[in-house]
Image (cartoon, rainbow, N blue to C red):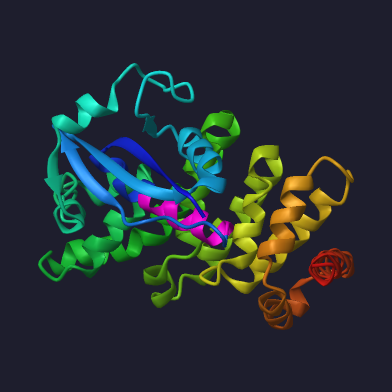
């Protein structure tokens, strides 16, 4: 399949968000092929260039634009570029950089910030780092451990509230919630209830905006998330896409292609006692739809 190049310009502190988005797209669209990421830099900003199969270039560009990443084009006439910036001129000024160079970039240190402030702003990862870093004093580590739950809850509440206030924040907030919901460090600390709460809030968000309904498919297929979150996402997806027979055609096609029925059955077995009869009906309807769609191919 023919490949086309995509080039994105982003701030250094957005590198992690970009990488997470690329991984999400790979999960959501199984036929998507993304080539090796090549990096360059312009001052404090990073250029990322990669190839993508032509069929999905539009989808990739659309998702990047929704996340407010600056997608650059070879010339100013191409696909309504966000800025009048010639890619040729930009590339002439870049300096080569490796992934190792970029991933080792350090964000501003938070080790000297009061734990109370980090909790208030929902920076739970920083609180977690303080709690686990033996270079910190025992008193500070204990303070961080004591306040970790509050920091995670603050992060969940801030992300969810921010998205409800502004539709434009929906994608960023959804990624934050799903990151918390699948955080292995939190899992290792047995913060399962917090992880479930984040995942369920992510589902609520997907139901609030039509443009996020397709993300329920990603939640259904993400094995990092708690089984209850998987089933609740399947319920929400089923209830959404079968209400109107024509409104969610694209989401139905994606569901038929990407839903892992075996994974849904496994998750259902684990969470059966926490699922109502109506929810069981919704999940079964989704499974039968996927099975029927695949049988036709």
Image height check: is 229 above or below 209?
below
Which is more toward the observer, 78 or 121?
Answer: 78
Q: Is residue 219 magenta?
A: no
Q: Nearer the viewer, residue 271 or 117?
A: 271
Q: Tally the marks.
A: 0
- Give the position of the C terminus as an image quadrant: bottom right
* Residue found at x 21% / y 65%: 141
Which residue is most to the top?
Answer: 84
Q: Is residue 209 visible?
A: no
Q: Please report the residue visible at 34 percent of the width from the left and 37 percent of the height from the top.
A: 8
* Residue 285 in the figure: left or right of residue 122: right
> x, y percentage for residue 136?
12, 64
The quadrant where residue 230 appears: bottom right
Q: Residue at x 24, y 62 (%)?
A: 129
Residue 254 appears at what percent x and percent y?
A: 69, 55
- Residue stretch rendered in magenta on the structure: 19-29
Residue 23 highlighted magenta (yes or no): yes
Q: Out of 83 and 239, give the one closest to the viewer.
A: 83
View extreme (front): residue: 2
Which residue occupies the foreground of this view, 293 or 251? Answer: 293
Is 219 above or below relative to 79?
below
Give percent across and percent down for residue 154.
44, 48
Which quarter of the figure has residue 31? bottom right
Q: Position of residue 190 (x, y in %)?
A: 45, 76
Q: Is residue 240 visible?
A: yes
Q: Is residue 239 left or right of residue 182?
A: right
Residue drawn 68% across and 82% down? 266
| Magenta stretch prevailing secondary structure | helix
């Amino acid at each position: 399949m023919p490949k086309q190049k995509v080039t994105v310009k982003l701030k250094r502190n957005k590198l992690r968000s970009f990488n997470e988005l690329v991984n999400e797209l790979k999960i959501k669209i199984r036929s998507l092929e993304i080539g090796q990421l090549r990096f360059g830099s312009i001052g404090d900003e990073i250029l990322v260039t990669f190839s993508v199969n032509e069929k999905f270039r539009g989808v990739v560009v659309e998702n990047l634009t929704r996340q407010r990443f600056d997608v650059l084009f070879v010339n100013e006439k191409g696909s309504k570029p966000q800025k009048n910036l010639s890619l040729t001129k930009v590339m002439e000024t870049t300096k080569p950089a490796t992934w190792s160079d970029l991933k080792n970039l350090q964000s501003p240190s938070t080790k000297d910030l009061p734990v109370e402030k980090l909790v208030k702003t929902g920076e739970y990862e920083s609180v977690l780092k303080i709690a686990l870093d033996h270079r910190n004093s025992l008193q500070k580590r204990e303070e961080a451990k004591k306040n970790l739950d509050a920091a995670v809850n603050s992060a969940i509440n801030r992300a969810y509230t921010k998205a409800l206030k502004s539709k434009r924040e929906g994608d960023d907030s959804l990624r934050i919630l799903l990151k918390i919901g699948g955080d292995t460090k939190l899992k290792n600390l047995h913060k399962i209830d917090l992880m479930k709460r984040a995942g369920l809030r992510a589902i609520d968000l997907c139901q609030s905006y039509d443009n996020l309904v397709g993300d329920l498919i990603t939640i259904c297929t993400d094995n990092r998330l708690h089984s209850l979150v998987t089933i609740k996402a399947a319920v929400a997806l089923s209830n959404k896409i079968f209400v109107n027979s024509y409104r969610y055609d694209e989401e139905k096609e994606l569901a038929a292609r990407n839903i892992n029925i075996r994974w849904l059955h496994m998750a259902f077995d684990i969470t059966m006692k926490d699922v109502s009869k109506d929810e069981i009906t919704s999940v079964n309807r989704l499974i039968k739809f996927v099975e029927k769609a695949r049988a036709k191919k």
